[in-house]
Image (cartoon, rainbow, N blue to C red):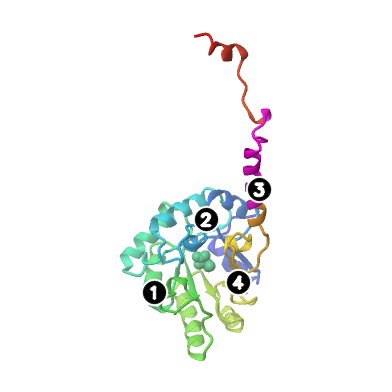
Amino acid sequence: MKKVTINTLLEMKKNREKVSMLTVYDTPSARMLEEAEIDIALVGDSLGNAVLGYANTLPVTMDEMIIHTAAVSRGLSKPLLVGDMPFLSYQASIPEAVKNAGRFFKEGMAEAVKLEGGREYVDVVKALINAGMPVMGHLGLTPQSVNQLSGFKVQGTDEGSAAKLLQDAQILEEAGCFSIVLECVPDRLAGLISSKLMIPVIGIGAGPECDGQVLVWHDVLGLSGREYKHTRRYAELAKPITDALRKYKEEVRGKEFPTKDNSFSMEDAVFESLFWE
Ligand code: KIV
């Protein structure tokens, strides 16, 4: 696999090649993602609910995102590494947004950042790009606005909101975003937006006509205990992992582990010397 850059992704769009993107949060998982030749590794703020046990993404901090982005960077080199700007890291002011985005590149070794929102963040997007930091947009169901949206609901289902979504996507493209995530919007709207933009549109719950797809690590591997209409489990790992842990406990209790084979030996003379005093 060749190194994936933002130019690679633009070329893929031109050649109608579908882009694969997956969230990832730690080094060993990043190694597997690289081995599987996934195009984009997203350290999503879904870190909050997928890994850190929060109810949603709102409590996730910059420090948490940076620790996990840096960990992922140590496990891969070929996929494009995108860091997700957490809630309140870019909403308050442009200088704060530039500084926080900069941490993803300086400390997390990210190669791009993602942020949620449309026209209201166009100045932030431009400021980051002017500072040399590629930006991926995120429209539709934007989980950081869950309270404003009154829950996790499909977006763009009426004429007004569908037209606004299309305009927002065009505004982000004009502002310089290299790609846009479209989350939970009707498939026909997602197809229309994808066809109107020159940059790749990566869907999640946005149907098959997007230029690529993104899923959350734990959903793909059956580790999240949840299944949504728009996701697919490619493995059921929770049960084999739990079974393995149970077997370990049983073998410890049953004195089957460790055996001599798992133990380190000591010279008889050294051992016996302990009794000579
Ligand atoms: O945080 C995340 O995992 C995301 C993806 C679902 C796109 O933003």
Pointer 1 or 2: first along the chain: 2
Pointer 3 or 1: first along the chain: 1
List x then y, in percent, for residue 127: 37, 68
Res 109 seen here: no
Closest to the camera, between mark 4 and mark 1, is: 4
Q: Is the residue 274 above or below the residue 192 in the image?
A: above
List x then y, in percent, for residue 68: 47, 53
- Give the secondary structure at mark 3: helix
Q: Which residue is mark 1?
A: 121
Q: Which residue is mark 2?
A: 25
Q: Is residue 252 magenta?
A: yes
**In the image, farthest residue toward the top:** 276
List x then y, in percent, for residue 73: 51, 51
Q: Which residue is mark 3?
A: 244
Q: Which residue is mark 4?
A: 228
Q: Identity of the amino acid at label 3? A: Ala
Give me the residue at 57% from left, 57% from top.
79
Report the Cα–Cα distance between label 3 and label 2: 23 Å
Badge 2 residue CB within 8 Å of ligand 1 = no
- Which segment is the magenta one? 242-261
- Give the secondary structure at mark 1: helix
Q: Is the residue 73 above or below the residue 276 in the image?
A: below
